[in-house]
Amino acid sequence: MLGYAAHQVLGQHLDHILATPSPSFQRSAKSPDSWTGFLSFRAKSGEDLPLWVRTQRAAVVAGGPPWSFLSFRLPVDVENEEIDEAVLRWLYESAPMALTVYGKDLRCLRKNAAMVRLTGSPNCECLDEISSQTLTGDGGVEWEAELCRALAEGSEITSREVRTPVPDSPDRERVFVAAAGPMFDSSDRAVGLCSTLSDVTEQRRARQRLMLLSEASERIGTTLDVSVTARELVDLLCPQLSDWCHLDLLDSMLRGEEPGPFSDKVALRRGAHSSVRPGAPETTSDVGEVAFYPAHSPPVQSMIMNRTIVLSSGDPEMAAWLAEDPRRARRFKKYGWCSVMVTPVGARGAVIGVVVLFRNKQGAFTDDDRLLIEELVSRAAVCLDNARRYTRERATALALQQSLLPHTRTDQTAVQTAGRYRPADSHVGVGGDWFDVIPLSGKRVALVVGDVVGHGISAAATMGRLRTAVRTLADVDLPPDELLTHLDDVLTRLRTENRHPEASGDVGATCTYAVYDPVSQVCSIASAGHPPPAVVPPSGTTTFLDAPCGPPLGVGGLPFECTELALPAGTVLALYSNGVLHAHDHDVDLALNKLGQVLRTPGLSLDELCEETLRQLLPPRPTDDAALLLARTRALGAEQVAVLDVPRQDSFVAEARSWTARHLDDWGLVDSGYITELLVSELVTNAIRYGRPPIQLRLIRDQPLICEVFDGSSTAPHMRRARLSDEGGRGLLLVAQLTERWGTRHSRRGKTIWCEQRVGPHQDIDLFDALPVM
């Protein structure tokens, strides 16, 4: 390179061939370290030649002087060498990627600065350690096995997730992404491995938080039930974010009161709790139990300030709370809670409860934990408040609906009845179907089944108004067809008054109204767009009434027709809504056949028959409301009814009184004879004087005793207060004072004035006490 022969330079000082000595080289020559850099040499031809020089101090021979190796390269190779040196220096000193070089025995040869920072041990202390000492735990052992396979097979490990415990917190772990590949010499022999590590613990935690939030959106609020929603929240918070947690809700809020204010002791009802230990042995309150928290306790303070509180076991607030509750203090000490987080449950500007979380294995709560827990609780709070409001509104709607259905057994002298109502499987659970049993005068009874269009509170409210209207019209004793006509007018007015039809739906309804008379054993039925009633006589055959069916209520302008049929005692009359039929695969004929078969089932009571009918015709989750009313007819025998035709003669009143006395004597009601004779005298006298033939007197022996007087006039009598100078006008006033009930019912042939009188020794009435003072 320089043109000198060996004998020309051996034994000479290096300066002999240097054109310009390098001060840095001269200083490094006195140190034991190697040196690399440029030196300018003088060639034999006299030219100066720059060369890249590397020096390496050699081992000293015993007794000999120190000496060094020098190697030279031309400038062309020098540039690459300088780049290689710079890359190596950057890789070991400045690279952000953590790198470790292992020998063939997987012992550490060198770590770069990033690896030293990542593992926390200096480079000089890491040499000769095996790979499982770099990454501890089961993850380190598995990683070492991966490295052995890679070295033996000469293959690369692109990416592996390795989890290792945190040295100071064995229950916590760090997550690394590791990669490795073998190193080969010029002969393609594996001489070791190079491994890289990346700490992705925080990235994994951030991903877990996002996944937890996504999971919360799916798992919390699946139902509109407060207890279920509370359970969903605590199951999400434990064990992923705590070792033990419980959710307590304000007892006043669950009772329907508005939350707050928080003063003195606050009653909190346990909504749900969850623990990493089976059976939740940490709890001091069972689910549903009410506990009273003092005003200074962390849960109440958190609700007052409406912010999260994080406490450690040694904080004064925690000590003061535990001092007042020895049982809680014993649990706290037994399970060694080191960190407590209290987060208020607030929605729509109101605090409705509190969540308390405990840790002893996962370490203290961090600020990131607080933000995540607050987000989860806030999402659940909206669901809890929705569930609370829904529960309250649904309870109100159900109370409204149930209040409009018969609550007591509706057995009458005329019929024995049983009914069932099944709401559709909707979000509200209430609807517009109803049934009713209305006692009428003369021991008759009205049977009603109706169906309002739609579901929910709006349909239930419309149903309530229609049921009230039916009862009012039934009290007037209107025939079935006339009653439906008036009911149609009521619904038409409701539709006109409905200013926002899109909010409550179209107002419409169907209805069947039947009146059964146990004396004549005749049933009068009229229908407004309703399914035909089923009739099952004692013989056991089922028939469906083939009678004219009028239009649904609310259409207006179309007439309704009344059908009369004889029903012998023991006949079962079934009235039902569309939901009973349409639930059966939407095949009405198939459903009618099925209904007829079930109604013919022998040996069942009416209640059992109702249950069996709905069980066989309704699916487990019906989509329409269903109402069913069954009535088994009874008859009043001839020995219970007495009828007398009355001529229009004033002198016949005495005969009517005598006739009444004889029948009362035959019935064993002599004690009630005088008052009953007085009532008969007044009613028959009025019919003779103001009515028209034919006139008929009828007595019905039952509890109570019924007296009826029919005449052909349609003029309705009315009670008035007579003046002292009036000779008459006191008859109806006297009747009202001496009877339990009285009234007038109209028919196409005339009117009937009736009254009901309690009979029996314990029901005697003092005549002079009953008479009004004049």
Image (cartoon, grey):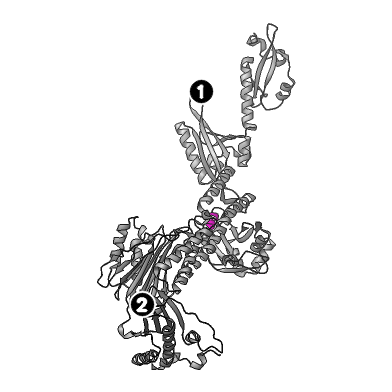
Highlighted magenta segment, given as a residue range: 232-238
Classify 10 Å Cα crowding around label 2: few (below 14), some (14-19), many (20 and above). Answer: many
Instruction: Please state the total of marks drawn on the protein image.
Output: 2
Q: In this orientation, which residue lies closer to the viewer: 34 or 572?
A: 572
Which residue was labeled with disc 1? 186
The quarter in which the N terminus is drawn is top right
**Residue 366 at x, y percent in the picture:** 63, 51
Identity of the residue furthest to the top in this view: 45
Task: Identify which residue is drawn at 72% across, 25% down.
Answer: 30
Q: Amino acid at mark 2?
A: Ala
Residue 414, which numbered label? Answer: 2
Q: Tell me: 458 left or right of 32.
A: left
Q: Main secondary structure of the magenta part?
A: helix
The quarter in which the C terminus is drawn is bottom right
| 534, above or below 650, in the image | above
| 425, above or below 725, in the image | above
Between the C-alphas of marks 2 and 1, the distance is: 112 Å
Secondary structure at numbered mark 2: loop
Closer to the camera: disc 2 or disc 1? 2
Classify 10 Å Cα crowding around label 1: few (below 14), some (14-19), many (20 and above). Answer: few
**Residue 177 at x, y percent in the picture:** 54, 39
**Mark closest to the chain's N terminus, 2 or 1:** 1
Secondary structure at numbered mark 1: loop
**Can residue 282 be seen by looking at this rendering?**
no
